[in-house]
Image: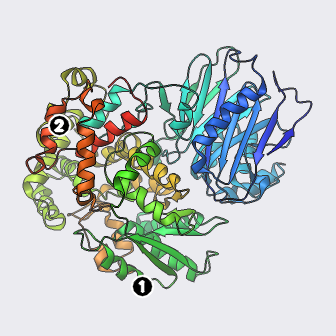
Amino acid sequence: MTHDTIHNTPYAIHHTQYAIRNTQNQKLMCGINGILYLNNFCSDRPAVYFENEIRKMNEAIAHRGPDGDGMFISYPVCLGHRRLSIIDLSKEAGQPMFNEDNSIVLVYNGEIYNYKELIPDLKAKGHVFRTHSDSEVILHSYEEYGPDCINNFNGMWAFAIYDFNKNLFFASRDRFGVKPFYYFFDNEQFIFSSEIKAILKIRNVNKANQGKVFDYLAYGYKTNNGDTFFQDIHELKPAHNIIIKSDGKNIPVFSRYWNFSQTDKKEFNENNISGQITDLIYDSVKIRYRSDVPVSILLSGGLDSGIIAKVTDELISGHHLNEEKVTAFTAIFPGFIYDESAIVKEVLSGLKNIDSVTLSPSGDNLTAEIRKFIYGMGEPVFSTSSFAHYMLMKEISKHGVKVVLNGQGSDESWSGYGRYFIGYFLLDILQSQPHKFISQLNAISDKMKFSKKFILSQLFKAILPRRYGSYLRSKYSENIIDCLKIDLIKDNYTYFKNPLYSKFSNSNLSSYMRYNIQYQGFNQILHYEDHSSMQSSIEMRSPFIDYRLMELAFSLPDKMKMDNGVTKKILREIFKDKLPPSVTENHLKIGFMTPFDNWMEESGTKDFTAGILNSESFNSRKILIPEKIRYIFNNKKKYPKFPYWRIINLELWSQIYGINNL
């Protein structure tokens, strides 16, 4: 390990300022850590104390960056970084990174996909580049534009900057929260990290946020309100910045820099909207191949990943990518009702530049992996799909893969979740075109294979206040409410906030979709995808989460996205001649389905579950009624919709993280 001492720095307040960086060339990943000390807290400690604090945090997230271990210590700021070298693999591109005169320091996790387009303007303004990294683009952009620099970025990011000339700490998270940024704050210090477990290494937090716990148990929600499952640990909301000035007050100032309201002003050419969408999709995929390591694809039998594979194939044929071949990884489950291997094979038959690798994650050693998985996630996760995703990432990592493209974000912005969106869609039809209500109802039933009773129940649910509708589902469908202590329900029922939009309009579908992305469902998907992939040192990139595509999608009339039982309507039309009908004409949205229920019924797993439900810790829970839960677990056929996974996940999470207030 080398020590690079920076001499004669007027901004090194109490200690010699130095950077420590390990540049061994290993496998790669990214994570950031840091502590900003406030009100002279710990100012009398030796430099080695601060180094040890950051080292503990870095070690906790070593899986995010086995390639490099960097830190920077200069009271009151201490920064740590674990590196995934994807763009510019040189040691000069390591972090923490400094500007030319060492007055600004950066730690950063993510990718600025349009960094190449930003360099000429910055050079024209006099900035000198020492690397070819997007990290240095952030540094020079901040020098030139201050906190407004993020408005120029297209990508996913969580970064922190300390400006010694201004004694200012500045941190930012990308528009949709693809990259995590957790923090703890009190009068003494502001601690932040890419993962909660790093904060816990230096701050003992063993109490759960009971509002989060109730929302999770009762509804299955992990709402994006800035709180986490840990009391006093928070996450920076997507599209938000933090600024802390060392002015004696040390008060964090939070500001939103981007909102979906901007999409209302987005203009599109009705005569060539298909062309605009196509151009943006192709460009979004293309810039996500910017990498100095190979990029792969996660391919299912769905429309979204099929589009990415087809666009990739055409970009290679047109010599618009450096790759000659790209590998597509597919999870298949032979004999499983939702196995998509036949559709995937049909898609691949038309792609000459895509190599295929099929993987079959199994339930072998499930009980051995599940504790490691739950610790790795940091917080309880919604469904068993997250565990299957984690196992799939472990398999993909064995092939030496570091970057994978997926289709995440398309369903949320182009109306792909028919099951959850149809109620809001029909509510709009009922208010704006009531004469078409019956024909739309029939078309939905025909295309999506839902019963009319179910469809009308979704309409009723859309009319109800969101919180009340969720409560009714949890009580009468899932049967979980009666397993919770009344005090937990009474104290936390209002924690979940109802959406703030009018139901008496014809924009319920669009409003709910925006709400879902910014507040409710999307956040929990991004959380498990980041954490499960990072556990295996894989970076996920999602072309459909490009903010330009998102803005365009929400500027279009809803009928272009959902109409007559067809979801993602315009995407299907654009790619109908590029992908097989088994993809473009398949209206049965199933998501990432795996035979997890079968795994859970294996004898070893059943014994493991029984051990959890009969454990001393489970029986001592003050928020649950253990005997009712055990009865339901022993009579699963009577309670097919009970959230079994959530009970197991929360109990193991509580044990693993030593939670003592549940």
- Which residue does the image show at 37% across and 53% down from the upper left? 387
Q: Which of marks 2 and 1 is nearer the N terminus?
A: 1
Q: Could you say which is closer to the camera, residue 255 or residue 95?
A: 95
Q: What residue type is labelled 1?
A: Gly
Residue drawn at 40 percent across, 58 percent down: 389
Question: Which residue position is annotated with label 1?
Answer: 350
* x and y percentages locating residue 330 in the rendered image: 41, 71
Residue 250 position by quadrant: top right
Q: Nearer the viewer, residue 547 or 267?
A: 547
Quarter of the image for the N terminus: give it.
Answer: top right
Q: Which mark is residue 375?
A: none
Location of the C terminus (image quadrant): top left
Q: Which of the 4 quarters of the picture holds residue 298? A: bottom left
User: How far apart are labels 2 and 1 at the CA level?
Assistant: 50 Å
- Residue 164 position within the rendered picture, expressed as x and y whole percent measured from the top left: 78, 29
Where is 148 relative to 68, above or below?
Answer: above
**Label 1: how many Cα within 10 Å (few below 14, some 14–19, many 20+):** some
- Relative horizontal placement of residue 658, taking residue 202 as reference (left or right): left
> Residue 524 appears in which quarter of the rendering?
top left
Q: Does residue 333 appear to the left or right of 392 in the view shown? A: left
* Residue 642 appearing in the image: yes
Q: Position of residue 461 (x, y in %)?
A: 17, 42
| Three-letter code for the amino acid on which mark 2 is drawn | Ile
Disc number for residue 629: 2
The residue lying toward the viewer, choosing from 612 and 152, is 612
Residue 506 in view, yes or no: no
In this view, 625 is above or below 366: above
Query: Please, is residue 41 above or below residue 352 in the view?
Result: above
The 10 Å Cα crowd at callout 2, few under 14, some 14 to 19, many 20 or more, is many
Q: Which residue is drawn at 56% across and 83% down?
A: 317
In the rendered image, residue 377, in percent from the top left (x then y), is placed at 44, 44
Callout 1: SS = loop
